[in-house]
């Protein structure tokens, strides 16, 4: 798949595990980690193992909806 | 400019405020102080950089003053008793946020809606804080046109110096009274020291906040200690009182504001009758001039407190004298005004009852 | 790769104290983004409320002066009148603005004070534990409306923005939400327009923002965003309520 390619970085220590980014990502690229962070939440994480038809486009939708500014987005 | 002019008390406050650099006024109509609000409307209009807002309530007015004070302006609001009740939350915020502001209370009879006659029923409210929390308001009680002119200037200076609300306590009589006044020269606002704590936008410096919420109990305690240290300094530096014929007196009448004018007339009358009576007139009500009063009690054992209420300042007198003297009280509640003759009679009776003529 | 989304300049490096999924922090971020984009960070003064956003000054990195509960518009009036070239905004919850502070808000709007007001409608008193707000929907449960808000007992919701639109001095009032990517983008445009309205000195503007309070709504954050779409907008339709400003540049 050509076109724009992107990636995100989730700051686990800012995340409150609200699932809003998970719900928002059109490519289902975000999951929930199974260890608590220091705030006491199960934080979101970026699924690096995304396959061909599930690539991050860097659309920043996840970051847009994140109430805790835990996500940074990079794009080519 | 420093010539004598004949003016009503309310207008004297307005003119003196402008000359003291007041550039923001917000108020809500209430008798007997409407002339002040009206005077501020005209004066601010005529003063470059001056703002007058007729607020929708006393609550709005005091909160506008909070905003103006945050921005660094010399700001004032005025009202009468019920309106001052509404301002109390804001005054508490001013104290906690350490913001300077001047508030004028032209007291009227109360409680409730009361009447518009002169009264001193708000002494407790004024001197005990009035609003919630552990704070103090500086309270000034002038009793002549000239003193209003001078002390209004002082009120703004104290407010800025101590970063604290200052209350000018007057009544309808003070407000209506026409007296010749010489105003102090207007100040040049640009010569005032910069208010480095004010909010002017975070240009070339980190952003800052003015707040009073201290969720951390240690921080709350820290603020209260800090305020307390400041109040102690104020209590040391500014208490002020007038002593009139007290040197040889066996008895002093203690009264402030309008009551003190009546009392002075009474003292003159009883002096003519040969009674050795003087007058002690607190000019600052908080801090109370306790030390000055205590001094008097070295050679005087009898005090008559006269108030236009049923006994409020008398508590401060007793606290100041710490049981060393006999404190008598005469009061008439708001709505009626005692005459000098009436007070002279009270003094006369007390003087003889206490056998004071024997003392000389 | 280029960073295309990051913490805006005027949002401090701090962990928000808000509950997971709370709309307040999204709105803080949007305000910070707009302040940066408009280049007004050095001359903006914010007035935070009593409410969950009482600590807004811990996050938004501009000068801030705290108002007593409900009095944001009056405090902002004082600030703006003394500093007419500065940008002054108040940030107020629905209880703050539409109950205790109704009078101050209506009169600031009617005077046409050149301030921006951000009105965060989460249909409850968040900070004090989920009591009924003037904005609570009919039938909505709150700790003081057992069995749901009942019109006879508790009155119907108050449409403050519509009331403010009647005031002559208001020039721009829009209701938006922060429950979806699309609505968040719209909210940012509305905040931008409000600040630009003020920069042009046109008068009073206000953005009412429907904002999730998952904790007091007893929902998950995702359910809360859906509830805004499915239920809340029926009482509070998202729309431009008043606009005499039109297109605005600068
Ligand atoms: C004079 C006064 N009354 C009551 C309160 C308590 N109080 C603090 S915030 C609040 C309501 C908060 O609700 P809202 O404005 O909707 O803000 P939210 O927390 O929902 O964002 C109340 C009643 C107060 N601080 N001051
Ligand atoms: S940037 Fe877009 S595609 Fe990439 S993770 Fe976020 S929402 Fe998904
Ligand atoms: S939206 Fe933000 S806070 Fe919520 S789960 Fe995703 S990264 Fe975490
Ligand atoms: S109670 Fe509601 S409004 Fe307050 S922080 Fe939590 S989610 Fe946000
Ligand atoms: Mg609310």
Image: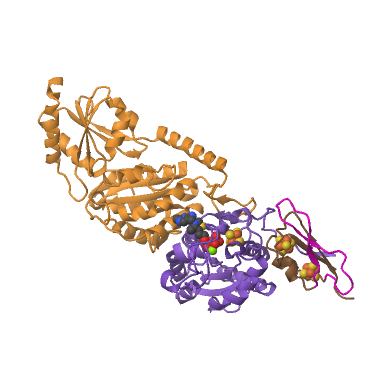
Report how many numbered discs are placed on residues in the image: 0
In the orientation shown, which residue stands out farthest toward the front?
Answer: C147
Position of the C terminus of chain B by quadrant: top left
Identify the chain drawn in brown.
A
Residue B76 vertical placement versus A61 (above, below): above
Q: Is residue B260 magenta?
A: no
Q: Quadrant of ligand 2?
A: bottom right
Towards the viewer: C142 or B34: C142
Q: Colour of chain C?
A: purple
Look at 31% across and 35% down and name the residue there: B316
Q: Which residues fall within the magenta stretch?
A: A27-56
Residue C215 vertical placement versus C181 (above, below): above
Image-based side of B176 in relation to B66, left or right: left
Towards the viewer: A17 or B351: A17
Identify the chain drawn in orange.
B
Q: Is residue A30 magenta?
A: yes
């Amino acid at each position: 798949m050509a076109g724009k390619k992107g990636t995100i970085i989730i700051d686990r220590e800012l995340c409150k595990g609200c699932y809003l980014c998970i719900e928002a990502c059109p490519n289902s690229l975000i999951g929930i980690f199974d260890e608590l962070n220091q705030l006491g939440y199960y934080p979101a994480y970026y699924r690096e193992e995304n396959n061909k038809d599930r690539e991050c486009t860097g659309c920043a939708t996840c970051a847009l909806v994140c109430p805790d500014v835990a996500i940074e987005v990079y794009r080519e | 400019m420093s010539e004598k002019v004949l003016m009503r008390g309310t207008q004297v406050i307005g003119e003196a405020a402008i000359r003291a650099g007041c550039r923001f006024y917000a108020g809500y109509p209430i008798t007997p102080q409407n002339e002040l609000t009206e005077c501020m409307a005209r004066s601010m209009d005529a003063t470059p950089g001056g703002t007058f807002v007729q607020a929708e309530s006393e609550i709005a007015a005091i909160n506008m003053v909070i905003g103006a004070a945050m921005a660094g302006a010399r700001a004032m609001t005025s009202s009468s008793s019920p309106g001052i009740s509404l301002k109390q939350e804001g005054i508490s915020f001013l104290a906690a946020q350490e913001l300077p502001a001047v508030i004028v209370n032209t007291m009227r009879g109360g409680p409730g809606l009361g009447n518009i006659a002169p009264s001193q029923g708000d002494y407790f409210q004024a001197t005990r804080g009035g609003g919630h929390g552990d704070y103090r308001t500086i309270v000034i009680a002038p009793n002549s046109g000239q003193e209003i002119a001078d002390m209004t200037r002082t009120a703004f200076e104290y407010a800025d110096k101590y970063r604290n609300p200052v209350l000018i306590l007057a009544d309808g009589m003070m407000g209506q009274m026409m007296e010749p006044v010489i105003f102090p020269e207007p100040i040049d606002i640009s010569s005032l020291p910069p208010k480095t704590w004010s909010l002017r936008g975070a240009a070339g410096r980190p952003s800052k906040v003015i707040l009073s919420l201290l969720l951390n109990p240690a921080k709350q305690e820290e603020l209260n200690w800090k305020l307390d240290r400041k109040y102690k300094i104020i209590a040391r530096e500014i208490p002020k009182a007038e002593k009139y014929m007290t040197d040889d007196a066996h008895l002093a009448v203690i009264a402030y504001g309008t009551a003190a004018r009546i009392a002075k007339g009474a003292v003159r009358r009883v002096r003519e009758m040969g009674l050795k009576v003087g007058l002690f007139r607190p000019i600052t009500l908080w801090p109370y001039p306790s030390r000055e009063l205590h001094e008097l009690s070295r050679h005087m054992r009898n005090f008559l407190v006269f108030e236009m209420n049923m006994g409020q300042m008398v508590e401060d007198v007793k606290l100041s004298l710490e049981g060393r003297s006999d404190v008598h009280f005469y009061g008439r509640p708001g709505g009626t005004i005692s005459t000098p003759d009436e007070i002279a009679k009270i003094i006369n009776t007390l003087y003889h009852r206490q056998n004071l003529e024997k003392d000389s | 790769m280029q960073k295309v989304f990051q913490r805006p300049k005027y949002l401090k490096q701090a962990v928000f104290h808000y509950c997971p999924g709370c709309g307040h922090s999204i709105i803080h971020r949007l305000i910070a983004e707009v302040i940066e984009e408009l280049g007004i960070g050095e001359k903006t003064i914010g007035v935070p409320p009593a409410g969950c956003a009482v600590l807004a000054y811990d996050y938004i990195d501009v000068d801030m002066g705290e108002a007593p509960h409900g009095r944001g518009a009056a405090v902002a009036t004082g600030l703006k009148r003394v500093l007419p070239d500065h940008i002054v905004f108040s940030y107020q919850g629905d209880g703050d603005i539409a109950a205790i502070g109704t009078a101050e808000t209506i009169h600031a709007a009617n005077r046409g004070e050149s301030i921006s007001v951000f009105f965060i409608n989460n249909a409850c008193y968040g900070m004090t534990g989920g009591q009924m707000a003037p904005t609570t929907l009919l039938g909505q449960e709150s700790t003081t409306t057992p069995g749901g808000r009942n019109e006879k007992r508790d009155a119907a919701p108050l449409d403050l923005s519509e009331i403010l639109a009647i005031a002559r001095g208001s020039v721009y009032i829009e209701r938006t939400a922060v429950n979806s990517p699309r609505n968040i983008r719209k909210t940012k445009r509305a905040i931008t327009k409000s600040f630009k309205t003020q920069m042009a000195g046109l008068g009073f503007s206000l953005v009412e923002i429907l904002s999730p309070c998952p904790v007091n709504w007893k929902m998950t954050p995702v359910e809360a965003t859906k509830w805004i779409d499915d239920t809340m907008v029926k009482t509070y339709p998202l729309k431009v309520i008043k606009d005499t400003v039109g297109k605005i540049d600068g």
